[in-house]
Amino acid sequence: MSGLPVRARFAVTAAAALVLAGVAVGYTALSSGPGGDVVAGAVSGPRLQVLGNGRLSVVSRTDPSAPREVTDQRCDRAYAAGGTIACLRPVGPLKAGGLAVLDSSLRELRTVPLTGFPNRARVSASGRMVAWTLFVDGHSYAANGFSTSTGILDTRTGALVTSLEEFTSTVDGSVVTAADRNYWGVTFAADDNRFYATMSTGGHRYLVEGDFAARTVKALADDVECPSLSPDGTRIAFKAAVGGDPQRGWRLSTLDLATMAVTPSAEARSVDDQPAWLDDRTIAYGVQRGDGVNDVWVVPADGTGSPRVLVPEANSPAPL
């Protein structure tokens, strides 16, 4: 695929991924975050994991502006569910990136060396399945000629799929073998086998439903990117390209899987993120400010209400 030359360029740094296994875990007291930062255990009640200044952090869902727990785990993208944390390590000039799978105590369970720039991460509700997306060519879904690499790890069996290109893909019952296929933004169903993702090919961006055991994906709908399945399994939150053109930005929306009806959210700004459901009614997502800093925002999933900042100076929200 188009990303192969870039993978070759990254090969010279791949050995450095082994260094990541020695990254220390634990919590640290800092003073730079909004409201000040605190040591582990200080945030009680409903909690939200975020990345603040590139560090795994925990904030209170009821008082997200209060002091937050800040760890020394550095990630470019992260997600947590079911006691499992997926952390896509930063890529630097002298080191390759990779996936670190951590438990709720931040103990490193497994690392997967990867080539590319971290972009999306997801964990199934049970904590068993972990997925990731990286750019291997280009840095934007709005650009032409970008290439992605998306994989899935079954933490229980150890089964590792390094690229969804290994799966058989169909659109309207016909197998798709085009070299321009790209996949990104995996989200898992409750059974830890079925999943949803985006597949692009031939100028279309499809919502696909995947079967991990059968190694298949099939297209369900057009113009659905970065899907996120609701906790009750009935709706998909996603970003929809405005007028079908990603260069015009994206509208945060929801898709009813029973009727395939789409409901635009009250968020009118362009959202280039994979949203996260805080509950069956609320969607969280990151928006970059003019100064380049991200904030976590929330908006009702049913198209009502107004967007509001939930966690300032943070991204990668995941309810704990």
Image: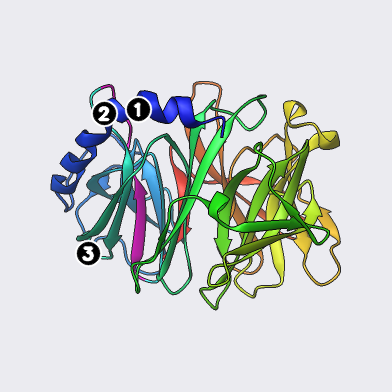
Name the foreground residue: 272 vs 62. Answer: 272
Question: Identity of the amino acid at label 1?
Answer: Phe
Residue at x-position 16% and y-position 40%? 19
Which is closer to the viewer, label 2 or label 3? 2
Q: Residues within 10 Å of mark 1 (few under 14, many from 20)?
A: some
Q: Which residue is mark 2?
A: 13
**In this view of the protein, can residue 303 be seen by the observer?**
no
The image position of residue 208, as x and y in percent, is: 69, 57
Q: Is disc 1 in contact with disc 2, using a CB cutoff of under 8 Å?
A: yes
Question: Identity of the amino acid at label 2?
Answer: Thr
The image quadrant of residue 33 is top left
Question: Identity of the amino acid at label 3?
Answer: Ser
Any magenta on residue 90? Answer: yes
* Up-down relation of residue 87 to residue 145 (above or below): below
* Up-down relation of residue 71 to residue 161 (above or below): above
The image quadrant of residue 54 is top left
Question: Seen in the image, is 127 located left or right of residue 266?
Answer: left
Q: Which residue is mark 3?
A: 105
First-in-chain label (2 vs 3): 2
Question: Seen in the image, is 274 located left or right of residue 241?
Answer: left
Q: Which residue is mark 1?
A: 10
Q: Residues within 10 Å of mark 3 (few under 14, many from 20)?
A: few
Q: CA distance from mark 2 to mark 3?
A: 29 Å
Q: Residues within 10 Å of mark 2 (few under 14, many from 20)?
A: some
Name the foreground residue: 23 vs 110. Answer: 110
* Up-down relation of residue 97 to residue 263 (above or below): above
Span shown in magenta:
83-93
Q: CA distance from mark 1 to mark 3?
A: 32 Å
